[in-house]
Image (spheres, rainbow, N blue to C red):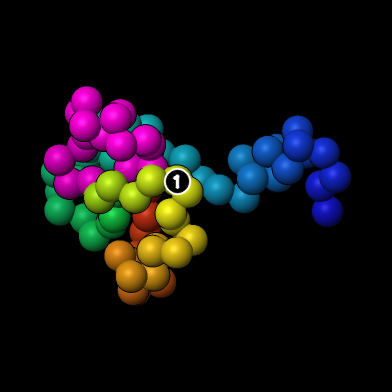
Amino acid sequence: MPTTGRAMIEAARQAVSTISSADLHAKLTAGETLVVLDIREQEEWNGGHIPQATFLARGRIEGRVEEIIPDKSTPIVTH
């Protein structure tokens, strides 16, 4: 189990897959089933966001993610 902040970040990087913006665009254009969660701050969202994204501020993820995405098999992309 990671014991330092740096080790925890590295463990998270290894456990969570990534996707490029080009690949995400291709998936959205193809109509693939996935959810894009924009977890930035409200001001950042207001400044511009991916049209298909759902705003869910980082501090509220744990309390609302099951409400927004009830199907646990749905792929989720965070931005």
The answer to if 50 sits in the magenta stretch is yes
Identify the residue shown where x is 68% and y is 38%.
Answer: 9
Q: Position of residue 17 (x, y in %)?
A: 51, 46
Disc 1 marks a residue whose amino acid type is Arg
Identify the residue shown where x is 37% and y is 55%.
Answer: 76
The residue sitting at the top extreme is 47
Q: Position of residue 15 (x, y in %)?
A: 62, 50
Range shown magenta = 38-53
Query: Quarter of the image containing the C terminus?
Result: top left
Res 41 visible: yes
In the displayed structure, 10 sits above or below 17; it is above
Res 23 visible: no
Assess disc 1: are there few (<14), some (14-19) or many (≥20) residues with their C-alpha within 10 Å of its C-alpha. Answer: few
In the displayed structure, 74 sits above or below 32; it is below
Identify the residue shown where x is 17% and y is 46%.
Answer: 52
Q: Position of residue 73 (x, y in %)?
A: 39, 70
In the displayed structure, 33 sits above or below 48; it is below
The answer to if 77 sits in the magenta stretch is no
Helix, strand or loop at disc 1? Answer: helix
Q: Which residue is under mark 1? A: 58
